[in-house]
Amino acid sequence: MSEVQSRECKVLVVDDEKSICDLLCQYLRKQGYNVFRAASGEEAVRIVEVNGIDLVLSDIKMPGMTGVDLLKWIKEYDRFLPVIITTGFPTLDTAIEALKLGAFDYLTKPFHLEEIGEKVRRALINRQLEEENILFSKLVSLHEVTKVLSSTHIVPDLNKRLLDFSVKLARADGGALMFFDSFSRLYTSETFPADHDPAFWKQEFYTACSQWAAGHEEPLALESGSELSPPGLPKLPEHIQSYIVFPLRTPKRTLGVLNLIRVEGSVSFSNIDLEIINVLASQASISIENARLYHSIRDNYLKTVRGFALAVEAKDQYTHGHSEKVMEFTVVLAEKLGLSAQEIDQIKYAGLLHDIGKIGVSENILNKPGRLTDDEFAEIKKHPDLGARIISDVPFLKSLVPLIRHHHEFFDGSGYPDRIAHDEIPYGARILCVADSFEAMTSNRPYRKAMPRDMASEILTKEKGRQFDPHVVDAFLELLQSGTAGV
């Protein structure tokens, strides 16, 4: 048996002459094909829509829908489905028209059966090559898609991208991404189109099929008119031509399912579509699990950071909540200045930890109600360096070291501990300096009462270019004037 018959190919013979149809069907069955027959173009359309035909052998002259009409319909329905036209009244114009419309080949009656067999074989090989080219193209796209998904750590973005990529690769008309909640109930996370009625995916058919795919840990594919569906599942809705659902599995558990549909009038999903999306679903499941793990680690990280901040503030009765407020200011200010999500995360945690070095400063100095002596102030000035050294050996805090160390550097180079200036000071540290100073000025301290915000704003303006980065101060003052939440 030839390479193209490694699976049983489905060939449809269309001819209104029963004797010719019988002869062709008998011969092609002997060649190992699964043969369907139709006596008219209209009947052929119904068979193609339901049975996933691999090749059509059609007479050109038939009552009602002609072979040319059938050819036009097939090329709109599935442009890769090969069609061989036969006729007992050959003309050059007819042959040219059929080939222009996309027929693979053209045969005249009477014909030799061996010739038909050879043309059918070549047409199927050609289809196989076209499918392999499509597969290669989709594999290239899949490679690019999986790279994007694996580098996305924000879970909602990852979910949306997964569904969008799946719809695009499978040329689906709609889709839904569903996940299990903590009570093992499926909920719809994303839909395509995004504004699709959420109630659509809550229909009994989709929930039952989704539960089946998740429970059996295998994809499920259903087509209109096909009886090949697992027992107990509801019937495919009338307006749906083809439906596939894939479990989203990791080695440890099933996270949810991916649903895709093609509506009535579309071609059914192909085996290539199923293979590509199955691979994508497998890769995406790992990416989703990794993203969730990443956020779990981040949550624990934030709890650890907050614990450090509370340990510092426990020594100083006047600074309770100071680090939290500085963190809020720095985040809003960093967003205003257009920092990336990663940079905002860094400055957020630096805001919480900027005073961690005060753990090494005496409580008597921290809580002294009067003016500090030079020696006492020298002790206070050690806290940025001490804080940087405390966190430098903690892997997930290491990136914060420059921000912690330099948050008391002045823009003109007169700050501490390293007396660096302008762009030598990390941008995040310049932001932190403004936020920290404003929060300190507008809060009660052992040596003074809190300043009004207007007075603190005037000091920020006065110190532009000396203590503070002018650009950062201007952005912060704009936030104050606009009444932005958190400032």
Image (tube, rainbow, N blue to C red):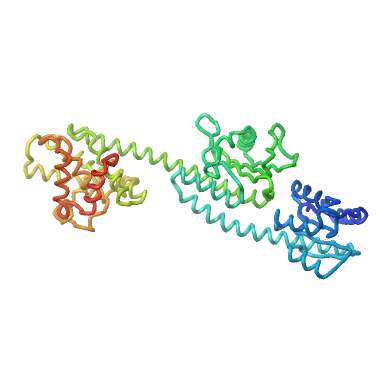
- The picture places residue 258, in percent across and down from the top left corner, at 58, 42
Q: Is residue 327 visible?
A: no
In the rendered image, which quarter is residue 374 located in? top left
- The picture places residue 330, in percent across and down from the top left corner, at 27, 45
| In the foreground, 475 or 354 | 475
In the rendered image, which quarter is residue 361 located in? top left
Q: Which residue, as the protein is rendered here, is positioned at the far bottom?
A: 92
| Figure quadrant of the C terminus | top left
Q: Which residue, as the protein is rendered here, is positioned at the far front?
A: 64
| Figure quadrant of the N terminus | bottom right
Q: Is residue 120 left or right of residue 281?
A: right
Q: Is residue 407 left or right of residue 462?
A: right
Figure check: 235 above or below 287: above
Numbered marks: total: 0
- The picture places residue 209, in percent across and down from the top left corner, at 64, 36
Q: Residue at x 59, y 56 (%)?
A: 139
Figure check: 107 above or below 416: below
Q: Is residue 423 left or right of residue 274?
A: left
- The picture places residue 459, in percent across and down from the top left corner, at 14, 46
Q: Residue at x 11, y 46 (%)?
A: 378
Figure check: 458 above or below 15: above
Q: Which residue, as the protein is rendered here, is positioned at the far top?
A: 183
| In the foreground, 441 or 174 | 174
| In the foreground, 310 or 241 | 241
Q: Is residue 382 visible?
A: yes
